[in-house]
Amino acid sequence: MDPTFLKAEEIGVRLEIVGNLPIWESSPIYRHQKEIDRIRATIEKVSPSSESCQCVHASDVYVSFQDGSLKRPDIAIFCREPEEEDEAIKQVPEAVIEIISKGYEAKDLEIGPHFYLSQGVKDVVVFNPYTLLVLHVRRDKVTRQVSPVEIVLECGCKCVV
């Protein structure tokens, strides 16, 4: 991992790189972390007998995309356990869930969905805990709902946002 990213962690900021655009963000507040934990506790297979996706999820881990971008989704959902444990994950998530932090709405609403879809992520969910708006974006469809709502993901997992 690039030392710049580790230094950013030490001073309490998060660094992501989308294309060639560096995006700095302060470390999340407690409300943000509570929402991540609440949503992660609901992630499961749509059908327990289905073996196509294991619904493995991780929060706040670096994911390295093929275009060189490096992002830290609030929640990344994979169908199998990623191989990387000590470096950025190279496996593209099946789904990504982002929780909006005040002051960083553009990163999650304007940059994130388009970027993730362009990299092969099938479902992008953006949750605003202040308005309870849930935006669910797929290549062919965008829906806006109000939390709490159960979302079934293309990979065969579901969650309550």
Image: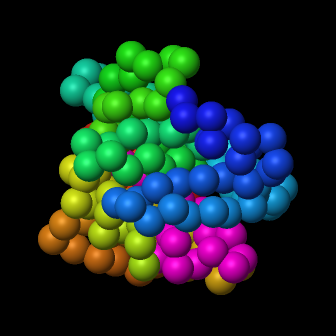
Determine if the magenta segment contains residue 104: yes
Residue 125, picture quadrant:
bottom left
Pick the front one: 154 or 93: 93
- Percent across and percent down for residue 37 are 69, 44
Quarter of image, res 44: top left
Question: What x and y, as percent, mark residue 98?
Answer: 53, 60
Q: Left or right? Give the position of 41 relative to 85.
A: right
40 or 95: which is nearer to us? 95
Residue at the image position 58 percent from the left and 78 percent from the top:
105
Is 100 rendered above or below residue 85?
A: below
- Using residue 103 as the reference point, say whether residue 143 is left or right of it: left
Lateral position of residue 16 relative to residue 11, left or right: left
Q: Specify the farthest residue to the front.
A: 3
Reply yes or no: does residue 87 show up in magenta: no
The residue that appears at 62% across and 34% down in the rendered structure is: 3
Q: Quadrant of residue 49?
A: top left
The region drawn magenta spans 95-109
Can I make out residue 86 in this image?
Answer: yes
What is the quadrant of the N terminus in the image?
top right
Camera-nearest residue between 118 and 124: 118
Instruction: Work out whether 50 lies above or below 21.
Output: above
> Residue at (34%, 77%) from the top-left corner?
143
